[in-house]
Amino acid sequence: MDLSNQKILVTGGSQGIGRGAALELAKAGANVAVNYRSNSEAADSIADEIRALGCQALVLQGDVSVQAEVEQMVSTVVQEWGEITGLVSNAAYSDRELMIKADMEGFKRTVDVSMWGAFFAVRAVSQQLVKQENGGSIIVVSSPHAKIPFPTAMAYNMSKAAIDHMARTAAIELARHRIRVNVVHPGWIDTPGERKFFSEEQLEEGAKNIPWGRLGQPEEIGRLITFMMSSDCDYMTGNTALMDGGISLPWWSNREEGKQ
């Protein structure tokens, strides 16, 4: 997987899956612009790691739910590097409550970041790629939540379902410009964000119920993203790649033991 001389923006790149993607892209030779909202120390740290791999890094503060800030990020990448060649739309937010009890500020924030933020990033990068007339690759990090109605996560479920269809629509609209758009569905991944909802003990116990018996790691998703962005996947667009350790399978079924 050779991404030498690629200039890729990763939203939400300071931690979790975004961090894993940024590092794996750099290992393949890409220059990476790391977007973050509030954790500047983590963003600076990943930028240092990218540079240590011999690639260039930019650190871009911005809230993806604000369209103007997303467009400024893309503009900065182009000003610094002369072009942008790809996007990993990863930034997300989630509050978890039953729909009938949900705090609407948190509900709306989840949709603003996870749905509108993804759209703003895909739109702004696509506009620049079309201007450049040299193709490009976009990965939208979605989730099995797009298909599985996990309770207490309605806003997140809605947002992920929406960006799946957004990405497929973008794929058909952008094919004539040789811009590929694909989706990744990571399963339960061991990230700092999971600590918002679960204790270490709960994560450890929950992992045992996954068919593969463990949580996924950010770098595993990062390697999948890198592969999908590379020329090895030139014929892939409008695709959704699932890497979830089997969590989307009917793991709750005990029928093999003769139970329901």
Image: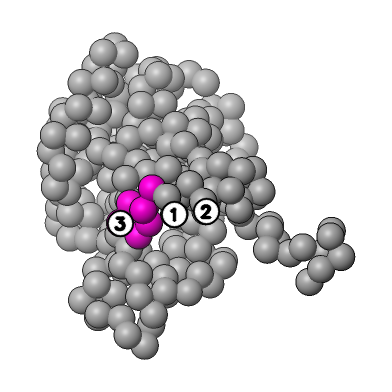
**Which residue is depicted at the point 50% across and 33% down?**
220
Outermost residue to the front? 201
The label shown at residue 240 is none
How many labels were placed on the picture? 3
Which comes sooner in the sequence, label 1 or label 3?
A: 3
Residue count near mark 3 (Cα–Cα under 10 Å), binned few <14, some 14–19, many ≥20: few
Instruction: Tell me the amino acid under the disc marked 1.
Output: Gln
Q: Looking at the picture, how far across and down is residue 260, in whole percent?
A: 78, 71
Q: Kindly check if marks 1 and 3 are in contact, taking CB atoms under 8 A apart as contact.
A: no
Instruction: Tell me the amino acid under the disc marked 3.
Output: Lys
Q: Where is residue 213, by image quadrant?
A: top right
**Which residue is depicted at the point 68% across and 63% down?**
252
Q: Where is residue 75, by image quadrant?
A: top left
Name the residue carrying label 2.
206
Name the residue carrying label 3.
196
Comparing labels 1 and 3, the label whose residue is closer to the camera: 1
> Is residue 224 a member of the stretch shown in magenta?
no
**Which residue is depicted at the point 36% across and 26% down?**
23
Q: Secondary structure at mark 3?
A: helix
Region in magenta:
194-200
Q: Secondary structure at mark 1?
A: helix
Name the residue carrying label 1.
202
Which comes sooner in the sequence, label 3 or label 2?
A: 3
Left or right: where does residue 138 sit relative to residue 239? left
Left or right: where does residue 211 sit relative to residue 162? right
